Image: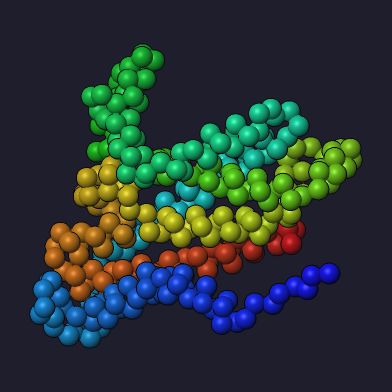
Amino acid sequence: MLKAIKPKMSVVWGFLAVPLIWYVFSVFVPLVVALAYSFFQWKGGPKKTFIGIGNYVQLLHDGTFWEAFGHNIYIVIICIVGQIGIAFINVLMVNSRLCRLKGVHRTFGFFPSTISAVYIGMIWKMVYDQKRGVLNWLLEAAGRPELTQNWMNNKSIVLSLISVPLVWQFIGYYMVILLAAIAAVDNEIFEVAELDGANAWQRAVYIVLPLIRNSLLVCITLCVSGNMKVFDHIYAMTKGSGGPGTSTMVMALYGYIVSFKNQNLGYGACVSVAIFVVSLAVIGGSQKLVNVIMKDKGVE
């Protein structure tokens, strides 16, 4: 019999070295450089003035940044409910015995997540357009022309409107993850529960959720981390202004405006570091909150 060949550790580390070096260079080096620049007053060019924690003191009193942080939290909440919630419902429907052409549903459900975020933002901007938008056209066709408006200028609902493309685009992404998790569960479990008289809601809450708990936590982590640094959709839909006023300003867009439009690269680096820190805090808090809620519901 052939003996298993045990590779030398030098060979293993040789193969791992290139991707590891690239990962460090593309992730950790920019973070360290941004942290270093955040202690300087820097308008670009070779001249930098060291000001210590001056940028961070300014950030603590920066109302626009904290308003943008609140907008990110709002978007995160909508996307957790919309993206993962709708994806979970779709998974239950696709995984049922009554569903046909399951592969087609998976393919077309995942398709929007492969499209560029900028294109998605431009498409939905046209949907909300006052003169040529599909939404106003549908309202006029339904005989309700009094409801038509310039949707992107309505400060009270514009943040919810720009969250819709985010929800729409990534439902299929989380749907694929949850489908893979459910596929690993033995179908006999669901059949026995159905024979015992458990309805669809009971099977979803008391059987499916506990079995895919870890995958659900992964989805929530990805959703929170992705939407805490959301930029592309909002930049495309607001022309990079975060308007009207600051009603759609998010942290990443604010960092971009400060760094490149206002030419305050030192303070922009400070904003970037703050985004990293508060995102980690929100991710950790969301995981603990989900664990507490699941334990209260008896999901271990």
In which image quadrant can residue 39 be found?
Answer: bottom left
User: How many marks overall?
Assistant: 0
Q: Is residue 96 left or right of residue 104?
A: right
| Residue 7 pos. (x, y %) | 65, 77
| Residue 226 pos. (x, y %) | 44, 56
| Residue 202 pos. (x, y %) | 76, 43
At 33% from the left and 30% from the top, the residue drawn is: 127
At 60% from the left and 49% from the top, the residue drawn is: 177
Q: Is residue 240 above or below residue 293?
A: above
Q: Residue furthest front?
A: 1
Q: Nearer the viewer, residue 182 or 19?
A: 19
Q: Is residue 206 visible?
A: no
In which image quadrant can residue 191 be found?
Answer: top right
How has the structure been colored for display? Answer: rainbow
Q: Quadrant of the N terminus?
A: bottom right
Q: Is residue 185 above or below residue 263?
A: above
At 13% from the left and 80% from the top, the residue drawn is: 48
In which image quadrant can residue 299 be found?
Answer: bottom right
Q: Is residue 270 above or below residue 223?
A: below
Q: Nearer the viewer, residue 110 or 68?
A: 110
Q: Is residue 284 above or below residue 247?
A: below
Q: Quadrant of the C terminus?
A: bottom right
Q: Is residue 8 left or right of residue 167?
A: right
At 46% from the left and 60% from the top, the residue drawn is: 225
| Residue 180 pos. (x, y %) | 66, 48
Q: Is residue 132 visible?
A: yes
